[in-house]
Amino acid sequence: MTVVEQQVAANSIGEGTWTVGVDIEPGTYRTAEAVTQQCYWGIYRSGSNGSDIIDNDIVNGGFPTVQLSEGQDFENNRCGTFVKQ
């Protein structure tokens, strides 16, 4: 993996649930490509197992953008890859 590929990987969020400040860096993230099918993203208070929703959205298109802070969990479900801005 090249240095550029490592930087891209370190600043990208794929499918799954991630802890900000542990798995991913805090910051503003936007999808790399436009959403073409319905997808869901959610931001939760860390340790709440998804029961304390800070923000979420069901997206049908466009480029969703999220602001992530330490102490949060982020779920990406079928939205593609979010890239740090």
Image (tube, helix red, strand yellow):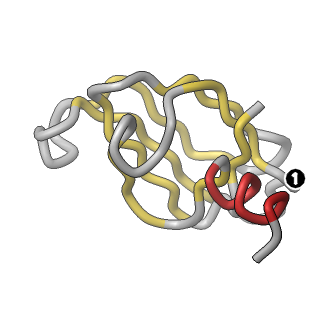
Name the residue at the front extreme: 3
Instruction: Tell me the residue at 67%/61% (across/down).
Output: 9
Residue 84: % across, % down: 71, 38
Instruction: Tell me the residue at 35%/25% (across/down).
Output: 70
Side of 10 relative to 77 (left or right): right
Side of 29 relative to 42 (left or right): right
Residue 48: % across, % down: 12, 39
Q: Examine the image and state in which quarter residue 58 appears.
A: top right
- Name the kind of residue labelled 1 in the image: Ala
Instruction: Tell me the residue at 33%/44% (across/down).
Output: 22
Residue 38 appears in the rendering = no
Q: Examine the image and state in which quarter residue 16 appears.
A: bottom left
Q: 44 above or below 17? A: above
Residue 69 appears in the rendering = yes
Residue 1: % across, % down: 76, 77
Side of 53 relative to 75 (left or right): left
Instruction: Tell me the residue at 59%/55% (across/down).
Output: 13
